[in-house]
């Protein structure tokens, strides 16, 4: 008996130690990455970076204004497509088609879609939009990123809605409210925080996508906000500037990375601060 | 109109998938009375009252047959959403809507169905809160989320929410089983007042409660109606042996 107890104690301590170590390692890794990027990126994060276009090689004071604006536009377009479509699919999966064969079909489609490598999505959008419009465009880039967002948002929305107790749906239906009002006015607001945080995670996922942009938005050295023209973006510029053989360009790339991470992290923080959460007991 | 029939049930059968849980019975529920539904757990009490406002059918794979007449109208030939407005329901767990304030919770049945008049909404909410004895107690907390309230208060908010849509019948599924004795007592007192205006059907596993508050008692066992009569008769002088042994606690 005594020996058994000791065994348990030792195991328990080992496990706790292991979990603690993993926690330390992951927070350490996060700090390391953030610290490294900040260290290299912060010196270049001045007004020029946000207000100027890239300077020719050898000249000082260039910025990536067009890429910052372009990333916002691309992410905005992606959200316009990915949020309603993804949340709609999530609602369908959780509330409407849960146990039906078409629900299973949609779930399978969402799974497959989330498994498709982003470069393939890029090629797909290239063949339907870029070829048709005969130009790389912000629109094509936004569509590609939006399509990548859909399964991420859908699966998260479904999961969060499943956490809302069935009793709330029943209570609402028993008041004589039509099904769609129960979902839109009672269940969705209750799940808003989880759904919103999921959206910011999906945005984080697509904000750094580079591969599909090679086929869709490409890039632009000039200030351009037109949806039907090629548009610059932070990931594309980071790629270009980081792989070039000039030190000044490397600095731009680092600062680009810092700005990109800052945008993504602020989105996540904002969602956590702004969206009210409810703990549904029982 | 004394002792008139509010709900007339005939040949009621219910299934979950292929499993039949109500075996087919009928009865008449009296207007402005409290009818208690008792029986061993799993006998179909919840299923039974959920068949009375078409809540049974929201469970995937669930099926009903037979008829339930509200006054003269067969609820299974009407729009379920409208039936649920006329036959409200209170559940075991106090399911307040967490994203809404107390006020919004109680107003939900009306405001989400399109009533926009603020003045009218306030009147209804205040009247409903007064009916459940919470108007003073809650007072200025009315515009806050319901999270700070005790479970007895939450359950009364849920009752007020059901009352606010002005139903004719209120179905209650063990509304006191999550509450402490004092909170239960409040609800019991409340029911006796509410029956002036509403027809009440209450499922309870508490025999004393059934005996104290109800006018009629239904005893269900294994999906069948075993006994139905005035509460004193069922408790003092049951016709069926099974009723007697259940009430006296000799069998489950
Ligand atoms: N959602 C459901 N799906 C399948 N079977 C169910 C469901 N709800 C209840 N049942 C079954 O139906 C029978 C009656 O249940 P219920 O009406 O909840 O009984 P009671 O309320 O008297 O305890 C039980 O055997 C129970 O297991
Ligand atoms: Mg029950």
Image: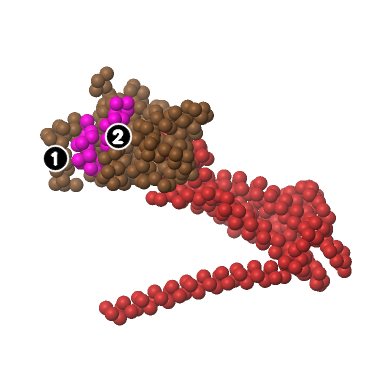
Chain colours: A red, B brown
Who's the residue at 50% across and 74% down the image? A21
Is there any visible trace of residue A169 in the rendered image? no
Taking the magenta stretch, the answer to whether it contains residue B202 is yes
Q: Name the mark on residue B244.
A: 1
Q: How far apart in space, not on screen, are marks 2 and 1 (Cα)?
A: 29 Å
Image-quadrant location for residue B160: top left
Q: State which tag comes first along the sequence, 2 or 1.
A: 2
Looking at the image, residue A62 lies above or below residue B63: below
Left or right: A211 with respect to A224? left
Element at label 2 = helix
Query: Residue B87, how many percent across, how many down?
Result: 37, 30
Who's the residue at 51% across and 27% down the image? B117
Image-quadrant location for residue A51: bottom right
Nearer to the camera, B118 or A255? B118
Taking the magenta stretch, the answer to whether it contains residue B189 is yes
Q: Estimate how packed mark 1 is, as few (under 14), some (14 to 19) or many (20 or more) residues with alpha carbons within 10 Å.
A: some
Element at label 1 = helix
Left or right: A81 with respect to B69? right
The quadrant of the rendering that contains the N terminus of chain A is bottom left
Image-quadrant location for residue B27: top left
Looking at the image, residue B223 lies above or below residue A241: above
Nearer to the camera, B119 or A11? B119
Looking at the image, residue A49 lies above or below residue A100: below
Query: Residue B37, how many percent across, how many down?
Result: 25, 37
- Residue bearing mark 2: B190
Left or right: B242 with respect to A94? left
- Of circles 2 and 1, which is in front? 2
Query: Residue A92, how many percent across, how many down?
Result: 52, 44
**Boundaries of the magenta span:** B188-217
Who's the residue at 60% across and 46% down the image? A85
Looking at the image, residue A170 lies above or below residue B126: below
């Amino acid at each position: 008996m005594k020996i058994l107890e000791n065994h348990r104690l030792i195991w328990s301590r080992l496990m706790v130690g292991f979990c603690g170590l993993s926690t330390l390692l992951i927070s350490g890794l996060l700090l390391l990455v953030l610290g490294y990027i900040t260290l290299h990126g912060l010196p270049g994060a001045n007004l020029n970076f946000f207000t100027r276009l890239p300077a020719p090689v050898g000249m000082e004071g260039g910025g990536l204004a067009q890429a910052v604006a372009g990333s916002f536009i691309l992410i905005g377009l992606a959200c316009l497509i990915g949020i309603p479509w993804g949340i709609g699919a999530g609602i369908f999966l959780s509330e409407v088609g849960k146990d039906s064969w078409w629900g299973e079909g949609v779930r399978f489609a969402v799974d497959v879609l989330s498994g498709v490598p982003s470069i393939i999505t890029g090629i797909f959008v290239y063949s339907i939009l870029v070829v048709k419009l005969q130009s790389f465009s912000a629109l094509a880039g936004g569509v590609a990123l939006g399509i990548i967002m859909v399964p991420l948002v859908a699966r998260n929305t479904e999961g969060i809605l499943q956490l809302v107790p069935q009793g709330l749906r029943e209570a609402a239906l028993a008041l004589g409210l039509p099904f769609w009002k129960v979902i839109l006015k009672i269940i969705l607001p209750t799940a808003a925080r989880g759904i919103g945080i999921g959206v910011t995670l999906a945005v984080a996922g697509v904000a750094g996508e580079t591969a599909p942009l090679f086929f869709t938005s490409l890039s632009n050295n000039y200030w351009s906000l037109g949806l039907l023209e090629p548009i610059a973006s932070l990931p594309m510029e980071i790629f270009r500037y980081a792989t070039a053989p000039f030190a000044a360009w490397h600095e731009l790339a680092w600062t680009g990375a810092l700005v990109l991470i800052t945008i993504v992290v602020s989105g996540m923080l904002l969602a956590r601060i702004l969206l009210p959460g409810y703990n549904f007991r029982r | 109109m004394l002792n008139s029939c509010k709900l007339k049930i005939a040949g009621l059968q219910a299934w979950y998938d292929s499993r039949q849980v109500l075996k087919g019975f009928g009865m008449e529920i009296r207007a402005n009375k409290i009818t208690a539904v008792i029986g061993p757990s799993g006998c179909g009490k919840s299923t039974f009252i959920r068949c009375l406002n078409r809540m049974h059918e929201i469970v995937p794979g669930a099926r009903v047959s037979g008829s339930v007449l509200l006054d003269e109208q067969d609820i299974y030939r009407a729009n379920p959403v409208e039936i649920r407005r006329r036959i409200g329901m209170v559940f075991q767990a106090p399911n307040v809507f967490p994203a809404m304030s107390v006020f919004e919770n109680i107003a939900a049945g009306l405001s989400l169905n399109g009533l926009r008049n603020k003045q009218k909404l306030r009147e209804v909410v205040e009247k409903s809160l007064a009916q459940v004895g919470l108007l003073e107690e809650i007072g200025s907390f009315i515009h806050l989320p319901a999270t700070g309230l005790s479970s007895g208060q939450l359950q009364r908010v849920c009752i007020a929410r059901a009352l606010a849509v002005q139903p004719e019948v209120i179905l209650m599924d063990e509304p006191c089983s999550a509450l402490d004795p004092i909170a239960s007592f409040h609800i019991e007192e409340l029911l006796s007042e509410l029956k002036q205006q509403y027809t009440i059907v209450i499922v309870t596993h508490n025999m004393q409660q059934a005996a104290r508050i109800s006018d009629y008692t239904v005893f269900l066992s294994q999906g069948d109606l075993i006994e139905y009569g005035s509460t004193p008769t069922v408790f003092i002088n049951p016709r069926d042996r099974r009723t007697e042994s259940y009430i006296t606690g000799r069998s489950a």
